[in-house]
Image (spheres, rainbow, N blue to C red):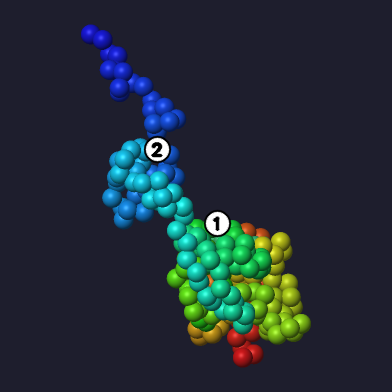
Amino acid sequence: MSTELPESESSPPTEESAPTRRTFVATTTAVGGVVIAGGVFGGSILSKPEAAAASAAPSSRVTLTVNGRKHTVTVDNRTSLLDLLREHLDLTGSKKGCNAGACGACTVLVDGRRVNSCLTLAVRLDGAEVTTIEGLGDGDRLHPLQQAFIDEDAFQCGYCTPGQIMSGVGCIEEGHAGSKDEIREWMSGNICRCGCYPKIVRAVEQTARRK
Ligand code: FES
Ligand code: FES
């Protein structure tokens, strides 16, 4: 018995006929999730301008205040707050570690609440107030928690430090810095690969006490 498949099943799709992931996503997104074969395979349902519109990434204008300064930017709808800060506003203090919500290196404050900016869509922040590590101090005067990190020597490579400090500020404001255990628990989303945890906790605890 022959085990050969008929030609249509055994031949891989050619470059020309195979939709790329990009064209598939663009087309299905543009028509509300309904797959239109003509759009994907270059048939007759979408006109040229419609096809062009489908392949262009949808974008939006968003106005938000960052560190007291108002910005209006047009961004791809998929842009994260972290990428908006780093790539559109040149605020590179917030770090990209995992880019998946697992390390806390990108922590900033949005309307006073700490968030992982890598998981926050920029287009959802119209009208929001964002504070990053660059806006925490008052001119040349450091925020008390920044000073405490220096005093306690609470970093080594420093990559996690902006996120740790922003998270620590949030933790203190929320009233979750009453003890070392509480600080450890409420800062557990901020990872330090250099293992500076005891000193970080001490810096947060001392700043909370002085408030
Ligand atoms: S970069 Fe955002 S949580 Fe890791
Ligand atoms: S100081 Fe290096 S990762 Fe925290």
**Residue found at the far right of this picture:** 140
Q: Which residue is mark 2?
A: 19
Residue 112, percent from left and from top: 52, 82
Dot 2 and dot 1 residues touching (CB under 8 Å): no
Q: Is residue 86 above or below residue 1?
A: below
Residue 74, percent from left and from top: 53, 66
Q: Residue 87: which quarter of the image?
A: bottom right
Tell me the quarter of the image containing the N terminus.
Answer: top left
Q: Residue 14: which quarter of the image?
A: top left
Q: Indicate yes or no: mark 1 CB to ligand 1 under 8 Å.
A: yes
Q: Please state the quadrant of the image where ligand 1 appears.
A: bottom right
Q: Which residue is mark 1?
A: 98
Residue 185, percent from left and from top: 50, 72
Camera-nearest residue between 196 and 60 = 60
Q: Is residue 25 above or below residue 184?
A: above
Q: What residue type is disc 2 on? A: Pro
